[in-house]
Image: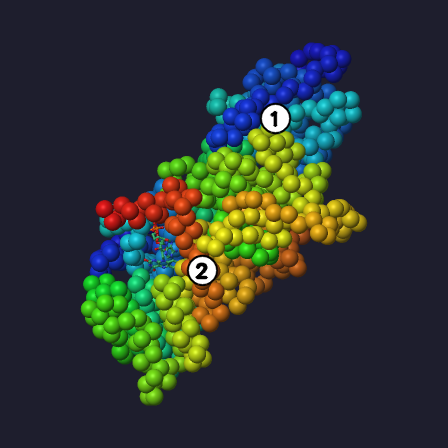
Amino acid sequence: MSDITAKQRMAIQRQPMPQRDGLERCKDFDEVNTGYDLETAIKEAQRCLQCKNAKCIAGCPVGIDIPGFISKLADGDVAAAAEILRSSNDLPAVTGRVCPQETQCECVCVRCKTDTPVAIGYLERFVADYARENNLEKPKEVSASTGKKVACIGAGPAGITCAGELASMGHDVTLFEAFHKAGGVLIYGIPEFRLPNKVVEHEIKNVLALGVKIEKNVIVGKTVTIDQLFVEGFDAIFVANGAGLPTFMNVPGENLKGVYSANEYLTRSNLMEAHRRDAETPVLRGDKVCVVGGGNTAMDAVRTAKRMGAATSTLVYRRGREQMPARVEEAHHAEEEGICFEFLTAPIEVLGSDDGWVEGLKCVRMELGAPDDSGRRRPVPIEGSDFVIDCDMVIVAIGINANPILTQATPDMNLNKWGYIQANDDLATSIPGVFAGGDIVRGAATVILAMGDGKKAAKSIDNYLKTL
Amino acid sequence: MYKLVDKRNLGPNLTLYEVQAPRIASSRKPGQFVIVRAFDHSERIPLTIADVNKDTGTVTIIVQTVGKSTAEMETLEVGGGFCDVAGPLGQPSHLDNFGTVVVIGGGLGTAVVYPQAVALKELGNKVISIIGARSSDLVIMKDQLGAVSDKVMVTTNDGSEGIKGFVTDALQQLIDNPDMNIGAVYCVGPVVMMKAVADLTAKYDIHTVVSLNPVMVDGTGMCGGCRVTVGGETKFACVDGPEFDGHKVDFDELADRLTTYQSHERHKDQCRMLKAADKIKE
Ligand SMILES: Cc1cc2nc3c(=O)[nH]c(=O)nc-3n(C[C@H](O)[C@H](O)[C@H](O)COP(=O)(O)OP(=O)(O)OC[C@H]3O[C@@H](n4cnc5c(N)ncnc54)[C@H](O)[C@@H]3O)c2cc1C
Ligand SMILES: Cc1cc2nc3c(=O)[nH]c(=O)nc-3n(C[C@H](O)[C@H](O)[C@H](O)COP(=O)(O)OP(=O)(O)OC[C@H]3O[C@@H](n4cnc5c(N)ncnc54)[C@H](O)[C@@H]3O)c2cc1C
Ligand code: SF4
Ligand code: SF4
Ligand code: FES
């Protein structure tokens, strides 16, 4: 690594991520963050102290050798840095963009003690982008064919990762995807201004290049069952169908025209590309939009609505700013884009016009009471504080549940009381040969945890196949 | 690609497509539907599976041209194919031997209800079909339904064929006939028609099944766009339906929600459904 002193390292400030102007970028779907250049990336890499006992590694759910890749980058050897990333993370260009670094790798970085953490996420993104754009990616090696067949159900981060791992171990892998396009939430949920489709598509292409086959438009549980897949000759199955079932608020007026679930709104605008004026799939373009919720999904919806031309786009959240589960960077970006926030506010009714369109959102103010089971202080309504937010569209983003299509068709599979699949430490389910991971096991979680599951399941499946 | 192996015109704006989709052909049960995209830029649209051939692995759909997607679909040629066909989706019909069953199809619903008539006949029911249309030239599938029905009745609003009036007028005649012991009614058509039929049969406590047609996106319970209120509860038509007990459905809400992309001044310029409808008129 380039020889600079520890003192010099400590003197370097965290390099800010170059980003487009808030009021400019909120008119289109191009990416907000434009990424480091090589020089800035190397400078940021030099901030890393190369700790012997690197805490950051334990903060990363897939245990990336963070000082390792950063040191190669600091030396200017991006190809080597990329290879280190790839060895533990199949989708670094994705996680570098969407991981909640502030609660994972970066929050435990020793530099937090003195100033600000090394920008691990930005560096990861840089390395992956630079390697892609300059053809520095070394193809993964594929072991000799084992003759064993594995089905991965769901082409989201968990399924894609597992398929890639298994294929490089020499197994014959087929991905089954319900939609007409692979990527899961990365394609239908997270908008392009945060994660461009071309980035996701490239990473998927890399996995398919390992020999993974994909069958789209297959809804496992409907088109084919798990039992039938075994009859077709698959030796093991990984279930990673995500948690796609929207939750509604159960308040009056929720079926008025102009009320969407975030899943519908984001699917229409992202997967079906309705944000393009010439797209076939329509989407309503509200002038005054309220989005209910405080997670990444709510943040994506409220920022999308702004980009679709809303004059005011407001996030309504029943807890306070500090309790919002969304990534800090997203909340910050939303503010820059002129998004309004109504904290400690809960909807109690959607108001409608005579012809059935949304006209307002009746809300009540909340205060934080005693902590609930999750340890978070529970919001309680303040009596008599009702008020109405004038709006013509409401998007509900208050969480998702387990989609029951696959599990209902698989009665032998043990589920927990919320309908998620039960899997043991090896991610094995109650059915021999069937493994599961990602959101369908964890409930709504994160991309990197889903990928971690994909990797772990691949190891377990490989071990299982050896016993056959 | 899902290869198109047969394409036939069945009447005004009515086309039959037989498409290669072996997995769907082998798992489909009557009452289920597919979601198709004719081209890579197309919208996802739901269409009932009219028939399947398990030996050749094909699925038949009967499609009425009403707007942009269905019009574009008509440009597909045998030998070419659909970009995407996903399914089978929805719950299978709960078909039974009810003795005598009245099968009612209004407008495009006639094509949708046809497979039910076939299956009901196979179960040994006496099948009486009623086809409703605005005028004689819009009456569809009379021969096909005739082949599986003990009797076919036609009603037209202008009286140009059969009984002048609505399907409910024909149904009332059947109900009033003392020799007729109607065990169940299957009805698919415009929302107003299904509502009128359900209102009528409720008076006589005749079990009535309707098939709902809300706007859909994924068809797998993921978006909630197809939600309907049945017996006071929210149901997703794509996973809980599309068939429901007609006496419990909130038809007014459904009719209203179906106008989402169609009627609202504020959104007119974004509403391609309107634009497409204008084009067809031209
Ligand atoms: C709007 C939004 C924003 C988010 N933002 C972030 C973020 O910034 N950072 C972060 O870390 N996490 C974020 N998340 C969470 C993250 O996306 C998920 O935790 C992650 O995608 C889960 O991966 P998965 O592979 O388990 O499932 P998914 O990504 O949901 O993929 C499941 C796939 O399975 C398919 N499928 C479903 N049922 C079937 C079936 N029966 N048969 C075949 N295929 C099926 C689906 O179509 C889908 O492609 C966000 C989620 C949403 C919705
Ligand atoms: C479960 C289900 C099964 C169906 N089965 C069949 C079938 O077997 N054959 C068939 O021809 N059609 C069927 N339909 C209706 C079909 O999906 C619509 O006609 C189609 O989506 C219209 O697309 P379009 O782009 O051509 O017209 P659009 O331009 O989308 O619409 C044209 C007109 O049709 C109305 N419309 C839009 N979507 C629907 C809808 N879902 N139902 C009714 N009207 C709608 C619009 O309001 C507009 O007035 C079914 C619908 C559902 C939900
Ligand atoms: S994958 Fe996520 S948690 Fe791990 S190092 Fe990268 S950004 Fe941090
Ligand atoms: S903890 Fe921070 S400084 Fe230490 S190795 Fe990790 S990134 Fe570098
Ligand atoms: S169409 Fe999306 S839930 Fe039914």
Whether residue A18 can be seen here: yes
> Residue A68 placed where, x, y %?
66, 24
> For the residues marked 2 and 1, what is the alpha-carbon distance in whole angstroms?
48 Å
Coloration of the structure image: rainbow
Q: In this view, does A384 lie above or below B198?
A: above
Judge by depth and name the residue closer to the eye, A101 or B15: B15
Which quadrant of the view contains residue A411? bottom right
Q: Mark 1 points at which residue?
A: A122
Whether residue A465 can be seen here: no
Disc 2 residue type (three-letter): Leu
Q: Residue at x 27, y 79 (%)?
A: B150
> Residue B133 placed where, x, y %?
27, 66
Judge by depth and name the residue closer to the eye, B53 or B198: B198
Disc 2 and disc 1 on one polypeptide chain: no
Q: Residue at x 69, y 17 (%)?
A: A13
Give the chain letter at badge 1: A
> Residue A218 placed where, x, y %?
44, 52
Q: Name the residue under label 2.
A: B254
> Residue A251 placed where, x, y %?
60, 56
Q: Which residue is drawn at 64% across and 57% down?
A: A418
Specify few, some or many for label 1: CA neighbours under 10 Å numbering under 14, 14-19, or 20 or more.
many
Q: In this view, does B13 lie to the left or right of A131?
A: left
Label 2 sits on a secondary structure element that is helix
Front: mark 2 or 1: 2
Give the chain letter at badge 2: B
